[in-house]
Image: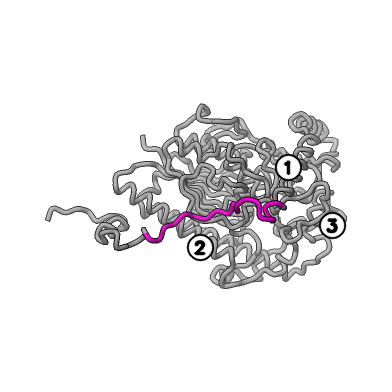
Amino acid sequence: MTRPNIVVIMADQLAPHFTATYGHKVAKTPHLDALAARGMRFDAAYCNSPLCAPSRFAFMSGQLISRIAAYDNASEFKASIPTFAHYLTSLGYRTGLSGKMHFVGPDQMHGFQDRVTTDIYPADFAWTPDWEAPDERIDKWYHNMQTVKESGVAVATFQTDYDDEVGFAARRWLIDRGRAKAAGNDQPFALVASFIHPHDPYVAKPEWWDLYSDDEIDLPDHVIEPADQDPFSRRVMDGIEASYVPMTDEETRRARRAYLANVSYFDSKIGEIVHTLDQMGELDNTVVIVTADHGDMLGERGLWYKMNFFEHSARVPLVMAGPDITHGVASNACSLVDLLPTFLDIAGADDTTLGEPIDGRSLLPLARCEADPVDEAIGEYCAEMTPNPVIMIRRGDLKYIHCDGDPAQLYDLKRDPGERVNRATDPDYANRAAAFAAEVADRWDCAALRRDIIATQKSRRALHAAMEAGAGAAWDYNPPRDASQEYVRNTMDWTVAAAHYRYPPLKETNE
């Protein structure tokens, strides 16, 4: 039996709420809509940590960040941790990565055979927070409200330059798989094409900006003043300067318009990749998955960016289409750690393939409209703007959020999808709140976890200081390329080169 190809198209900081696929009345996302129209839309998919690198490491490994010490954007992703790229390569897939994965450390491949672009962010320990001084900003790296105030239009940014490269390189890698197949290599392939948009800065190209108008852009539905925020949200507001840098309605509207424009820009990349698969004749044999590393508050609750477990920050889009995937909507809670076992399931493997325990389960039953007894997503946040781990449990309709020293939070998402009423002290929810509290105490030793986090922060800051002084080589990925062997050169027969590059190849005739 032919094993399906796997193509993951990943956005950065895309909340599903801002796509037409998930019901936004203004957003224009025709290509994501088209995938959902022939596949499965997951309506309660979460990241496992609402920050770029930790979320991606959980996605790659199928493990929660506390298990692999992937605490923040400067945590090393250890080479000894098996990823789905390792497993799929071992199972005979040709594996490739185009775009951002925010790998930190000397291993910049993590099982991928091909990596065709550099990353957009540094691969060292520069972004290490300090929980012993949690109120101090990593000044040049922390988000701040100036980024929001500068939202608008530009012909080019470092992000659009990057994503245009990522899209081109991904499509060329796919065409190379087509060339290989035309030459007799039927090896299945697995590609991750990972884009930076719609991540801030909220600056859009004119052609995408012009898809929208100011008068159709809504303002945040629910804004909470700093004095009324829960303690963790207030720390986040202070950290990003939202507590004391006021935003005008015009500035907020401009940022949200640019964000929607960049959502549409990302959606166009989905369309380009799907079109390439169709041109190759591989679309019907490819499972296409679209998701993101986390969401964006975009002013909701008075918060911006991510770094919290409210819905706009913690939820991600997840749409899956392809062979044996049913058209429908899955309501069970799930998360990014579930994708590794899903990929192995698609590849025809089982748990005996695993080199380490994982925290996820395959989503193929849900993708086929079969029963799934699991309705749960787990989140952990161990990065900046908190002095203690923040834990989330989403189970059924309830979401529980815990942080040592802060009041517990419990939301009934069926009754209160906007998370406006904390039920943690509601007598009607007393038993469930107590059960969640007991579960957190049983599953996590938050004090021990905090000690480990602080220890790794100290060691990484010392190592970063040494690297800044000249110790060791930079880890930023430099894609290998030998231009002297590309296209047509005097060392080759140009007719052979032309035949190699032409795709589909000319059919032989008997004339």
**From which residue to which does the magenta span run?**
466-484
Q: Which mark is in front, 1 or 3?
A: 1
Q: Where's residue 275, x and y in %?
A: 42, 56
Q: Where's residue 216, x and y in %?
A: 64, 67
Amino acid of disc 1: Thr
Q: Reading the chain from its start, which is encountered first: label 2 or label 1?
A: 2
Do the residues bearing badges 2 and 1 touch, measured as CB atoms within 8 Å? no
The residue at the point 58 percent across, 31 percent down is: 356
The residue at the point 48 percent across, 58 percent down is: 167
The residue at the point 45 percent across, 33 percent down is: 348
Question: Is residue 344 found left or right of 2 in the rendered image?
Answer: right
C-alpha gap between disc 1 and disc 3: 31 Å
SS class of the residue under badge 3?
helix
Instruction: State the quadrant of the C terminus.
Output: bottom left
C-alpha gap between disc 3 and disc 2: 39 Å
Q: In this view, does 9 lie above or below 391?
A: below
Residue 391 visible in this rendered orientation of the protein: yes
Question: Is residue 261 found left or right of 176 in the rendered image?
Answer: right
Q: Residue 226 carries which label?
A: 3
